[in-house]
Image (cartoon, helix red, strand yellow):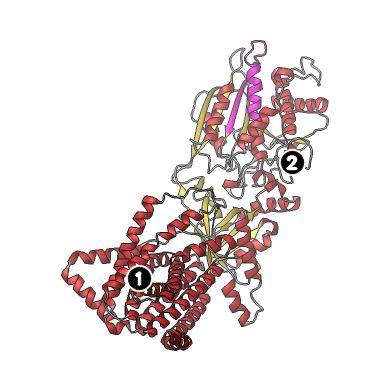
């Protein structure tokens, strides 16, 4: 709408990242470069994913309105690469579990924010036309920060050698949830015909639940030994 | 973080110069990137007439529009784009908008023009000349209604009418929920079109039997006029006249191919352009023929000039003359023959002569025959309109509008002016019979009044007339839109040359220094309606976002609390393990 509106959206999208970075103590660990490296890994992984998708998933040419469940499911499966990427980032950083998780998640989420949200915001929110979708997009970026922190935590737990047997199943379930979250939400949208605000709410609730679960597991795991 | 970042950047730029380009060029590109035109709704609008005639400006003088939409009900209209629907349109409202210095006026026309109630059609037709009579500074546009546009109108109406007596909280809520619309046209400012050529067409059928044969001229102008050029389809005025002229050309060309029926009259057909702009095409044609050439059919023995104007409806026929014809002249014969044919063959038609002197003080000539009258050629106009002031002759309501029901004779006829093909063909027959009676001098030869010449193979073909009117009304034919390459002119030329000899084009271009007429462009544009919010909304949003971010800050600061709660909950479990 105006530059002011863009400023609003920008603040809404970026300030939580900044606050998280400051308050999580990452700045004291001199972790800026590590976050940038994590972001670079994000770029690399996305490139690989894109190449893979373009090679093996021809564009779906179904009728309008039809939803290709199997195809979408397969496409979300490619997001497993994200897990690998996060693992790669964490394995290259030495340090405490929290630190590794936070560095990987912050770098990853920030890279995603810059790469996939900044340009639409700049181009769209500055235009004459007002649309709530830019505010929604900014909220969405906040949600995805939480999502990536939870995901990094789950990946970290999954790759630990000393993970108790009883934890194996819930961690795997959470991992699957993280990967197929986008697919699940899309499914919801398709089945229940949700509006954009409702989708955002569903996303927030789902992400909150997943992260709370992973927090419980994480706390239990960290303090059990 | 910033210190580290700046260090990083410093090192980067010092170490490698090309990296600066990689970072900065995209940044610069992004900063200067143009804003995209992603509009809520995009629709075609037709601008009101803009032209100068004899140095006098008419119509709207502006084409650029970039303002917020309001309806007339709003309290403040200044610098706003006022949108109205035709159903609610009135001259008072229009004047009110202009008086309050509105930024623009957009009038929404219904999609189906033939479904408009009669009174609204009449009222709007009366208003059209008044809207054009004065110069309007702001742009005036016409748009065709669709669902999106209607919804924009409704939303603007609710937001416009509810302002005023509201509490502050309601106003705040209103700003957050209601949508404003920014109307933006994509085109540039309107410019005078230089060197615009108005095309007219002439063709002839030459008589036999001696030198210096009398000539009968049949004239009809093909261009249309309405408040917006792109909406002027001009079915009755003057699609009916042109179609009748073509039919006469067809019938007489048949007669002129046989030696026995080849008459001793030259027939000259002229389809004139610029008829709605003081008959510019006719004027030039007369100048070319009378002043600039030595031999022309118009210079010697012209029996009379018959102008056909608006003949596609009604049961009355008027012969408009500027000087009552004297007895014994060919005009008088035609008048008498018309009376005879109407009385004996079509008694349902009311035929009469209307006498109106040429008023040279007037800016506009009343009828086309006055152009000839000024040059001392005996001329008259045949029309079903009793007066040249009739609004039907220059209205966008004058459309073909054949609904399936009215085509088969059943159902109500459309409210506005339209062409009734059966009446048009009857009028064509009246004219053809009368002309034939003059040409073959049948009355003096003792033929009875109900002798019909154009019957059986020679009869007036209603389908033919109908097809021609359909074709003519398929696109707007305003003088500003029909240039010399346009399909209308070339098809007309083709039609004429099928029946007539020596089909020629005549072009009129306005004089460069002292132009008699000037047309302007940008008559059809794309308008975008962008959904916008008031500035106060941005402020409100900023406050909300600040509050949200503050909450986020507190939440993240006190994440330890949540952590310890979770830990306390999980503690017993840990002991079990």
Q: Residue at x 42, y 60 (%)?
A: A77
Residue B76 against residue B219 in the figure, above or below: below
Q: Nearer the viewer, residue B181 or B72?
A: B181
The answer to whether tags 1 and 2 share a subunit is no
> Splitting the image into 4 quarters, where does residue B384 fall?
top right
Magenta-colored span: B243-271
The C terminus of chain A sits in image quarter: bottom left
| Residue A175 percent location from the top left of the image | 43, 69
Q: Position of residue B130 (x, y in %)?
A: 65, 54
Q: Nearer the viewer, residue A51 or B429?
A: A51
Residue B371, visible in the rendered structure: yes
Residue B304 lies, in percent from the top left, at 65, 27
Q: Chain of mark 2?
A: B
Question: Residue A5, can we see it?
Answer: no
How far from the left and from the top, in percent, is residue B66?
Answer: 50, 62
Q: Is residue B17 left or right of residue B120?
A: left
Examine the structure image and report whether residue B266 is included in the region drawn in magenta: yes
Q: Which residue is mark 2?
A: B386
Judge from the rendering whether residue B367 lies leftward or rightward of residue A44; answer left or right: right
Query: Was residue B182 drawn as part of the magenta stretch in this picture?
Result: no
Residue A108 image label: 1
How many C-alpha atoms fall within 10 Å of the one at disc 2: few (<14), some, or many (≥20)?
some
Q: Residue at x 51, y 72 (%)?
A: A206
């Amino acid at each position: 709408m105006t530059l002011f509106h863009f400023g609003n959206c920008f603040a809404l999208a970026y300030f939580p990242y900044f606050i998280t970075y400051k308050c999580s103590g990452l700045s004291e660990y001199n972790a800026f470069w590590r976050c940038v490296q994590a972001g670079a890994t994000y770029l690399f992984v996305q490139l690989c994913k894109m190449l893979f998708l373009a090679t093996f998933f021809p564009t779906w040419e179904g009728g309008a309105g039809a939803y290709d469940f199997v195809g979408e499911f397969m496409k979300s499966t490619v997001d497993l690469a994200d897990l690998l990427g996060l693992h790669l980032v964490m394995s290259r950083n030495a340090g405490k579990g929290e630190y590794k998780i936070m560095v990987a998640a912050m770098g990853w989420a920030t890279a995603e924010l810059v790469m996939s949200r900044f340009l639409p915001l700049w181009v769209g929110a500055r235009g004459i036309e007002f649309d709530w979708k830019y505010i929604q997009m900014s909220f969405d970026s906040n949600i995805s920060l939480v999502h990536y922190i939870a995901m990094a935590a789950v990946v970290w737990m999954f790759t630990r050698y000393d993970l108790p047997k009883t934890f194996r199943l819930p961690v795997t379930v959470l991992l699957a949830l993280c990967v197929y979250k986008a697919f699940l939400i899309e499914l919801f949208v398709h089945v229940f015909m949700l509006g954009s605000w409702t989708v955002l709410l569903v996303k927030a609730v789902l992400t909150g639940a997943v992260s709370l679960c992973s927090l419980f597991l994480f706390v239990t795991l960290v303090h059990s030994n | 973080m910033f210190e580290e970042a700046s260090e990083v950047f410093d090192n980067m730029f010092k170490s490698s110069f090309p990296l600066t380009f990689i970072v900065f060029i995209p940044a610069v590109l992004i900063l200067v990137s143009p804003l995209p035109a992603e509009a809520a709704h995009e629709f075609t609008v037709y601008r009101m007439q803009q032209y100068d005639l004899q140095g006098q400006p008419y119509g709207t003088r502006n084409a650029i529009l970039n303002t917020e939409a309001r309806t007339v009900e709003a309290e403040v209209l200044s610098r706003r784009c006022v949108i109205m629907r035709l159903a609610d349109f009135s001259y008072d409202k229009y004047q009110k908008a202009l008086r309050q210095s509105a930024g623009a006026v957009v009038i929404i026309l219904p999609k189906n023009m033939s479904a408009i109630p009669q009174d609204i059609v009449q009222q709007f037709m009366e208003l059209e000349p008044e809207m054009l009579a004065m110069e309007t500074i702001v742009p005036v546009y016409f748009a065709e209604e669709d669902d999106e546009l209607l919804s924009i109108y409704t939303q603007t109406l609710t937001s416009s009418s509810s302002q005023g007596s509201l509490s502050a909280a309601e106003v705040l809520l209103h700003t957050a929920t209601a949508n404003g619309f920014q109307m933006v046209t994509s085109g540039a400012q309107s410019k005078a079109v230089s060197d615009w050529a108005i095309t007219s067409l002439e063709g002839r059928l030459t008589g036999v039997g001696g030198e210096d044969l009398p000539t009968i001229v049949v004239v009809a102008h093909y261009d249309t006029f309405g408040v917006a050029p792109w909406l002027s389809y001009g079915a009755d005025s003057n699609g009916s006249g042109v179609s009748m002229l073509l039919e006469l050309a067809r019938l007489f060309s048949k007669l002129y191919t046989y030696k026995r029926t080849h008459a001793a009259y030259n027939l000259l057909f002229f389809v004139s352009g610029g008829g709605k702009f003081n008959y510019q095409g006719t004027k030039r044609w007369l100048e070319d023929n009378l002043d600039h050439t030595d031999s022309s059919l118009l210079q010697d023995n012209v029996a009379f000039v018959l102008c056909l104007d608006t003949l596609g409806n009604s049961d009355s026929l008027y012969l408009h003359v500027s000087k009552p014809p004297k007895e014994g002249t060919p005009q008088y014969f035609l008048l008498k023959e018309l009376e005879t044919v109407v009385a004996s063959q079509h008694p349902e038609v009311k035929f009469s002569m209307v006498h109106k002197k040429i008023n040279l003080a007037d800016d506009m000539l009343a009828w086309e025959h006055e152009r000839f009258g000024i040059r001392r050629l005996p001329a008259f106009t045949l029309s079903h309109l009793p007066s040249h002031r009739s609004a039907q002759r220059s209205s966008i309501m004058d459309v073909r509008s054949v609904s399936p029901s009215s085509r088969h004779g059943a159902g109500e006829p459309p409210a506005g002016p339209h062409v009734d093909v059966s009446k048009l063909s009857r009028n064509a027959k009246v004219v053809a019979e009368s002309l034939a009676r003059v040409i073959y001098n049948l009355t003096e030869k003792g033929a009875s009044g109900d002798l019909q010449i154009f019957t059986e193979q020679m009869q007036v073909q209603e389908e033919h007339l109908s097809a021609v009117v359909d074709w003519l009304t398929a696109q707007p034919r305003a003088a500003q839109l029909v240039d010399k390459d346009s399909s209308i002119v070339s098809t007309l030329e083709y039609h004429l040359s099928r029946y007539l000899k020596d089909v020629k084009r005549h072009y009129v271009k306005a004089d460069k220094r002292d132009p008699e007429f000037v047309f302007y462009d940008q008559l059809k544009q794309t308008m975008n309606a962008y959904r916008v919010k008031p500035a106060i909304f941005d402020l409100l949003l900023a406050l909300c976002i600040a509050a949200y971010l503050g909450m986020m800050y507190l939440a993240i600061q006190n994440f330890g609390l949540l952590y310890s709660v979770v830990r306390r909950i999980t503690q017993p479990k840990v002991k079990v393990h």
